[in-house]
Image: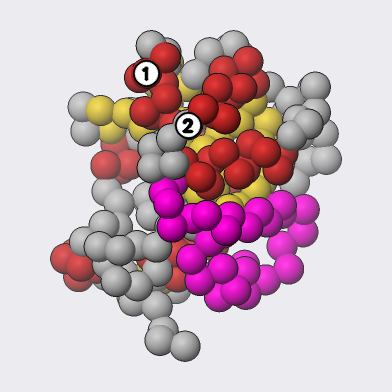
Amino acid sequence: MSSDASLAIVVLAAGMSRRLGFPKQLCRWKGESLISRAVNAARAVPQAKVCVVLGAEADRCAAELGDVQDLIVIHNPNYALGIGTSIRKAFEELDPIPSEWRGIIFCVCDQFLLDASVLLSLTAEAILREHPVAASYGGTWGTPLYLPLSYAEKLSQLPDDKGVKYLAKREGWEPFFVPFEEGIHDLDHLEDLDRWGIERPSSS
């Protein structure tokens, strides 16, 4: 990963996965945990400094990642209150953000079809614009989502249980879009495991 980063990519991986009943971060697809897949996709972007926010099962998630060079690991003690706490915590931990950085990309680990090509396309748009850029899929849009630094200052106002898309809609930000049709698939329900051949995490 390049040392002259132009933006940060924040992997949000702190959630409790209440609907599943076990940590989706540690589920495995094609032999790799979902948290590792997301972090590795982000690390393939040469312009980016990669951060991961941990909360639920933080020790197991950290062990899964191992000693990844240059990875910023952020622990969110308030993860149970919602995704907004992780986003705010990441922004706080990154502050002061280097002046040469253009902005922050937020992504989630349960979009298991996310790969480096999507993040590279998003980054290519991001470095050209002083404007939000989001992935589009299934007639809607969302993560991964880029905010320039001038927009990211609003992250401190994010409610505990809301994500970046909520903030964008509240503020009337109309993002540019990068197609990511596979982004409509994420891991939220038990039936998704059988459908995609995703393995549950071990009990230990």
| Whole-percent x, y for residue 68 in the image | 71, 62
Q: Which colour scheme is used?
A: secondary structure
Q: Is mark 1 on a helix, strand or loop?
A: helix
Classed neighbour count for the residue bearing mark 2: other residues with Cα under 10 Å, few (<14), some (14–19), many (≥20): some
Residue at x-position 66% and y-position 46%: 50
40 relative to 26 in the view: left or right: right
Residue 57, numbered circle = none
- In the image as oriented, which residue stretches furthest toward the right? 3
| Whole-percent x, y for residue 174 in the image | 39, 12
Residue tagged 2: 158
The residues tagged by marks 1 and 2 sit, at their Cα atoms, a distance apart of: 10 Å
| Whole-percent x, y for residue 39 in the image | 57, 54
- In the image as oriented, which residue stretches furthest toward the bottom? 204
Classed neighbour count for the residue bearing mark 1: other residues with Cα under 10 Å, few (<14), some (14–19), many (≥20): few
Task: Give the magenta range.
Answer: 54-83
Q: Quadrant of residue 166?
A: top left
Residue at x-position 57% and y-position 18%: 151
- 80 to 47, vertically: above or below: below
- Name the foreground residue: 70 vs 181: 70
- Name the foreground residue: 81 vs 21: 81
Residue 170, numbered circle = 1
Residue type at mark 1 is Arg
| Whole-percent x, y for residue 111 in the image | 37, 50
Q: Quadrant of residue 76?
A: bottom right
Decide which of tag 1 and tag 2 comes sooner along the chain.
Answer: 2
